Each structure stands twice: as structure tokens, then as C-alpha cells.
Image (spheres, rainbow, N blue to C red):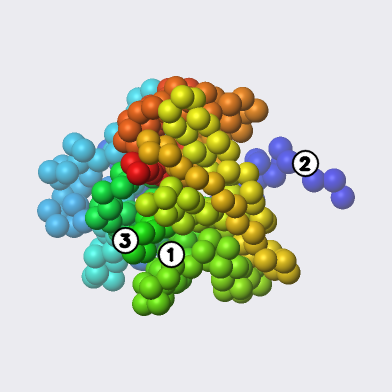
Amino acid sequence: MNIDIKELKDSNEFLNILLEHIDAAVFIADENLKVHQFNNSFLTLFNRENSNIVDITFGPASGCINAVKENKPCGETSACKDCILKRSLLDTLLNQKPNEKKSLERIFYIKGLCVKKYLEFTSRPITFRNHKMILVFVYDVTKIESSKIELEKKQKQIDIDLEKAGQIQKHLLPKNLPNIVSITADWFFEPCLTVGGDIFNIYKENETYISAYILDVSGHGVSAALIAVTVKQFLDQLHAQGLSKGNPFTPEKILNALENEFPFERFDCYFTIIYILLNIKTGKMAYGCAGHVPALVVGKSGKFEVLDQHGTIIGLGQDSPLPQGITRLSPGDKIVLYTDGLIDYFGKKGGLPNKENFYSTLRLLADKPANQIVEGIMAEQRKIRDTPQADDDISLLVIEYKG
């Protein structure tokens, strides 16, 4: 049997069934906000008895705190002048235009208790009993809004915790150089989130050697930061062992110890690292690179050396030992360690010219002291990168060998 929708719309029985079985509270009000008709959902929403709301205004009918406390109808309480519900409904009536989904946060007296409710209401102008009136649909969104508020509180606490974690991570970076007259250093660190997966450090091994490293954990955020801190703690232990034995570990031994300690299966991540060991009396430097962007040595007279001896990423479970390379520094040379986030944003993100942009900038700064090199590189990168906020961590460490 075909159903004529128009015929249904004209059926009072159909409309009454529809109104009584929808979740929205529905009522009809006049210019004084007096309630003339309502459905069962209205009574359920405000837990009212049918006899309690006949021919009274919305405030007393719903248990609005302002109407109940002052024992006054809508329009006469001290809070009515600021009531969004009143303004919206009267606007619907006066201008004969609907208002869609306005929000109302209000306390209502329900069973003698104060209950905060979050409501959304939509109003329509109608003609009812030959009078211009307002048809109002009220939706209870208290559970949704309460959940949002709770989530916002939790997110705020998470943000606070992340901020604290970020400060802790920054405190793990070198604050002051070891007391070594043969070197100076400067650095820059910018996590893409509050915390990041980059970390670096400089150690004084003894009166003859210093060591330094920079590493980059895959991913971003808390998980990457936790791995970075864990790796730092492991390297701190190796440094302490070297001090106790009076003989620092070589980069080759460091990298292979990391490979054994941080398999991908255990940590579900990998990282890249460069580790250097510099004899500050002779300038001889050993370095190990595990999948990291190559370190650079720059100096006077256009010296520009790419330390390209490298092995693969830590965590891949390779069988062969990770190798190390050897170079020699002259007084005034600078060792430049960095992470790939620096190059990624030396121009358009991930652009092919970015590495050359970085190299060209570094060549122009090669004769400068470490702090001016760091300042110059970061100033140029900020000037030419195509986004103010990077989505990868950026780290730069420059060590100057004075001989």
C-alpha cells in the first residue's frame, strides 16, 4: 500500500505520535515565553509533572535556577536580560525567522537538586490557535558536553605533563662545556612537538680525549623522546665505564654496543647516530656513523670535509660490526653534527636543493667561531624554510677545535 506523506502530515494522530516519540523536548511558547503545548520528552528532560507547567513560562516550567530562586516568571528575573534563550525565541517571533542550534548552559532544579545541563535549542515561528507563536526543539547534550569538558581537562593535564617533560629533556642537553681549553661549542635544539627524538651531548673522557654524539630516534613526540633519553642513559653508563677504566670506548665499540642493546624487536623503533672521539692534543678524530646524515669538518682556507664513512641504522639487527672512520683536525677546524630535520627545512620542505643550501651557508661561515656558525645557520634556515612550524626535530651541534 502506498503511503501519502502529505496525508500523514495532515494527520493529527501521526503528528502526536511523532512528537511523543522523538528524543527532543518540544514546546510551543508565546511572546511572554508561556508554555502552551509540550511533549513527553519535555517532562522527562526536566523531570516535571504535567500539571506543574500548564500555562506558566518556561523558567518555572523547566525549573530554571533563576526563576526558582527569585520565584518569578521568564522576563522578570535579574538574569533574564542576559538569557540567550529569551533573546533567541523573541527574535524568532519578532522577525519570523528560525534560529538554529543555539547553546544553553544552565542549572535547573530537578527533584530538589541543582543539576547543570547543556542544551541545544532550535526555534521556528508558527501560527498556533490563530496566534503567532514559537515552536522550540530542545536537545539534551549534557553527556556529550560533559565528556568534552572531561577530555579537555585531561588534554590540559597532558599538555602540562608534556611541557614538564620538554623542560626535562632540555635539561638533559649540555648546559655548559666540560672544562676543556682546547675546544668551544655551541648548539641549537628545536623539537617539532613539546618533546622530541633528537638528543646530543659532549663528554670529557680524560685530559687527552673528548667525545660527542648526536642521535635521532624515528618518530616524534613522547615515545621518541623516551627512547632518546634511554639511549642517553646507556651512553652515560658507557662514558662512566670508560672513566673508571681510564680508557674511553671507541666509536666503533659504542655503535656496536648500541646495536646489541637496542634491537628493533625490543623497542619497536630505530635511531641514527654519529659518535666522535677526539684527541685534543693531536687533533686525530675517530668517528662512527650509523645511518645518520654525515658529520662535516670545516675550517680555514675553504676546508670542507664530509665524513662519509658509515654503517646502517641502529636497531636493524645487522651481523657485521659497525665500522668507524678516521680524520685529523687542525686548530680552528669545526666539527658540525646535525640531524636531518635541519636539512629538510633548509628551503622548501624536503627539497632537493636543501642540502646544497645548507652546505653553501656553512662554507660562508666556516671561518667564524662555533656560536656564530650556529646563529648564522639557524638564521638562514628560518629565512628560507617554507613553514614556520617544522614537523621534524631540528638539532645542530658545532664543536671548534683550538689545538
Which residue is located at x 34 percent, y 64 percent?
206
- Name which residue type carries label 1: Lys
CA separation in Å, label 1 and label 3: 23 Å
Residue at image mark 3: 207
Tag on residue 232?
A: 1
The amino acid type of the residue labelled 2 equals: Asp
Residue at (33, 33) in percent of width and height = 369
Pinpoint residue 338: horizontal percent, then vertical percent. 48, 43
- At mark 1, the secondary structure is helix
Q: Secondary structure at mark 2?
A: loop
Answer left or right for 70 relative to 184. left
Q: Which residue is mark 2?
A: 4
Give the mark nearest the N terminus, 1 or 3: 3
Whole-Å distance between the Cαs marked 2 and 3?
Answer: 97 Å
Q: CA distance from mark 2 to mark 1?
A: 75 Å
Q: Position of residue 172 (x, y in %)?
A: 33, 59
Residue at the extreme front: 282
N-terminal-most mark, 2 or 3: 2
Q: Which of the pair 233/122 is nearer the observer? A: 233
